[in-house]
Image (cartoon, helix red, strand yellow):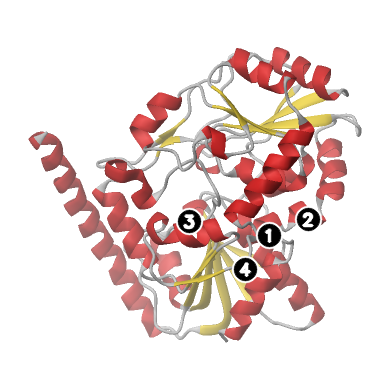
């Protein structure tokens, strides 16, 4: 125990020293003026692409720019410059000095994850935190209890102290953000921009993604999107996912028997894993399995699918806004709780069935009762106070304009 504490304290000292060194670049870059029309965005600490809520905020800004209503310049911090963005968005390599320069000269920041430890925000810059999760089973921040490491707290607090507005899509998130994000600032109930497409883009994305992946236009798709493991250890940060041993042929057969039609499965790695793994780790191959992990935006995938399976990801609480069935498959539930902390909901509090093995998942699909599911989903939405309506991006841009 003493050796572990000593190692943790040594690691924290090292991280604090690194943060101090990084902060010097931000102070140096304050010699440059803030540009009032400049907005800097990033997803998943730079490892993500044109995705999540920042994408939909950007699209609303670009729409207004084209109409001549605004004249914003959008700069996007990204690790891989090969990632695709609209031509109007300027991609910059996510290095210390590019971050320091662009963040120090921007009027607004829009992000879905933390900044790098050591980042410093100038007075006059506004930071809008959209966060990449919403209602979830997975505990975050103080809800992790003694599983929340000291370094994770320090990094979270350092970032949250800079946030001007944390955005919420439900009363549940509004209440949870305080301890979840370690945040005591202003929370605006704008809705979640990434959910807008679930209200306005379902038909278009159903057609588009089937065409892109060469599957029949009338095919049905189940999204399988497990979350990652790890991510906030006390002395070293890492993320991983084990090889998935689901019997996908039986899974597809179960969907076809229950819901009719021809079914495919979209496999989706978490964005913080997709840059490090060449493909989704499955123990079997099938022509009905399509790896969409390199597609940057989860929201447009959800808009195109007909069912969702995950373990602890927030995706299931957003995908069900389109009415698609959701199933939880958590074959490492006990180990996950031991590592991550107690889940945010008990199984009987959510509208989704929970399986801890493949056989039970197949049974849950066979036993799915659509009328009961819709009733439970409606009651859950009411209980947690989800107020998504497809206009969150507009609300966020209006909020940004009010700060100019």
109 left or right of 286 in image = left
Q: Give whichever of 281, 355 is nearer the camera.
A: 355
N-terminal label among 1 and 4: 4
Q: Which residue is mark 3?
A: 113
| Label 1 to label 4: alpha-carbon separation | 8 Å
Residue 40 rendering spot, x and y as whole percentages: 54, 69
Q: Looking at the image, which residue is at 63% across and 60% down? A: 192
Mark 1 vs mark 3, CA separation in Å: 20 Å
Side of 329 relative to 297 (left or right): left
Nearer to us in this view, 79 or 57? 57
Say which label, 3 or 2, has the lower sequence index: 3
- Residue at image coords 68%, 66%: 392
Q: Where's residue 139, x and y in %?
A: 43, 44
- Looking at marks 1 and 3 on the same chain, the residue that comes earlier in the sequence is marked by 3
Q: Nearer the viewer, mark 1 or mark 3?
A: 1
Mark 1 lies on residue:
388
Up the image or down, 396 lies above or below 385; here it is below
Q: Which of the 4 image quarters holds residue 229?
A: top left
Q: Tell me the SS state at disc 1.
A: loop
Q: Residue 190 — which label? A: 4
Specify which label sits upstream in the sequence, 1 or 2: 2
């Amino acid at each position: 125990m003493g050796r572990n504490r000593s190692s943790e304290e040594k690691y924290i000292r090292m991280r604090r020293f690194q943060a101090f060194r990084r902060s010097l670049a931000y102070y140096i870059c304050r010699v440059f003026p803030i540009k009032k029309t400049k907005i800097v965005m990033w997803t998943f600490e730079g490892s993500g692409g044109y995705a999540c809520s920042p994408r939909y905020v950007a699209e609303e800004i670009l729409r207004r720019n084209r109409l001549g209503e605004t004249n914003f310049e959008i700069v996007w911090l990204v690790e891989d410059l090969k990632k695709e963005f609209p031509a109007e968005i300027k991609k910059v390599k996510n290095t210390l000095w590019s971050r320091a320069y662009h963040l120090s000269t921007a009027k607004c920041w829009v992000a879905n994850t933390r900044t790098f430890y050591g980042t410093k925000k100038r007075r006059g810059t506004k930071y809008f935190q959209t966060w990449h999760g919403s209602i979830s089973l997975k505990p975050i921040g103080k809800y992790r209890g003694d599983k929340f490491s000291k370094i994770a707290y320090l990094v979270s607090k350092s970032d949250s102290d800079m946030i001007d507005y944390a955005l919420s899509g439900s009363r549940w998130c509004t209440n949870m953000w305080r301890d979840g994000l370690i945040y005591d600032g202003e929370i605006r109930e704008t809705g979640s921009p990434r959910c807008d497409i679930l209200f306005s883009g379902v038909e278009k994305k159903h057609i588009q993604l089937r065409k892109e992946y060469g599957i029949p236009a009338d095919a049905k798709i189940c999204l399988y999107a497990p979350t990652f493991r790890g991510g906030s250890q006390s002395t070293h940060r890492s993320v991983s996912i084990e090889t998935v041993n689901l019997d996908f042929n039986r899974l597809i057969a179960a969907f076809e028997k229950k819901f009719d039609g021809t079914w495919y499965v979209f496999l989706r790695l978490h964005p913080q894993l997709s840059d490090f793994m060449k493909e989704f780790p499955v123990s079997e191959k099938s022509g009905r399995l399509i790896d969409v992990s390199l597609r940057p935006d989860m929201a447009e995938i959800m808009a195109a699918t007909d069912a969702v399976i995950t373990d602890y990801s927030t995706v299931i609480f957003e995908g069900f806004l389109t009415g698609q069935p959701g199933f939880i498959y958590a074959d490492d539930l006990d180990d996950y709780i031991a590592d991550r902390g107690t889940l945010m909901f008990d199984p009987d509090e959510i509208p989704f069935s929970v399986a801890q093995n493949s056989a039970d998942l197949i049974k849950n699909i066979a036993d799915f009762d659509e009328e009961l599911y819709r009733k439970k989903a409606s009651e859950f939405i009411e209980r947690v106070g989800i107020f998504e309506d497809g206009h969150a991006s507009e609300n966020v841009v209006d909020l940004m304009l009010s700060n100019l």
